[in-house]
Amino acid sequence: MNLKTIAIASAVGSLLALGSATVSAEDAAKEKCLGVAEAGKNDCGNAKHSCAGQAKTDKAADEWKYVPKGECEKMGGKVVEKKAM
């Protein structure tokens, strides 16, 4: 590798690292909320299916969606507590 290639690779790596740090900050400002997802607009799987967007009914108790921190209960949902590792 020459110096130019190393510099470009380093710059791209830095941008990727910065992007993942930003995503983490956004995730910290959100919480998992059960019972507020509309049909087809859930954020992830559950015991019945494994993918986002597969909720069959509005506001199903076992479907969840990420919402801004502090908004879940205002919307009529229940916050999913993070599990300790």
Image (cartoon, rainbow, N blue to C red):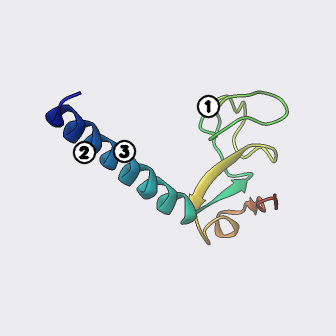
Whole-percent x, y for residue 16 in the image: 36, 44
* 26 relative to 40 in the view: left or right: left
Q: Secondary structure at mark 1?
A: loop
Q: Nearer the viewer, mark 1 or mark 3?
A: 3
* 78 relative to 26 in the view: left or right: right
Whole-percent x, y for residue 41 in the image: 59, 38
| Above or below, 77 relative to 2 | below
Residue 70: which quarter of the image? bottom right
Please tell me which residue lies in front, 69 or 71. 69
Mark 2 nearby-residue class (10 Å; few <14, some 14–19, many ≥20): few
Whole-percent x, y for residue 46 in the image: 79, 36
Whole-number angstrom distance, CA of label 3 to CA of label 2: 9 Å
Mark 1 nearby-residue class (10 Å; few <14, some 14–19, many ≥20): some
Residue identified by numbered label 3:
16
The label number, if any, that marks residue 11 in the structure image = 2
Dot placed on the residue nearer the N-terminal end, 3 or 2? 2
Q: Nearer the viewer, mark 3 or mark 2?
A: 2
Residues at marks 3 and 2 touching, judged by CB atoms closer than 8 Å: no
Dot placed on the residue nearer the N-terminal end, 2 or 1? 2
Q: Secondary structure at mark 2?
A: helix
Tag 3: amino acid? Leu
Q: Residue at x 81, y 57 (%)?
A: 85
Tag 1: amino acid? Gly
Residue identified by numbered label 1:
53
Tag 2: amino acid? Ala
| Above or below, 84 relative to 54 | below
> Is the N terminus in the top left, top right, bottom left or bottom right quadrant?
top left
Dot placed on the residue nearer the N-terminal end, 1 or 3? 3
Whole-percent x, y for residue 28 in the image: 56, 64
Residue 77: which quarter of the image? bottom right
Q: Residue at x 34, y 43 (%)?
A: 13
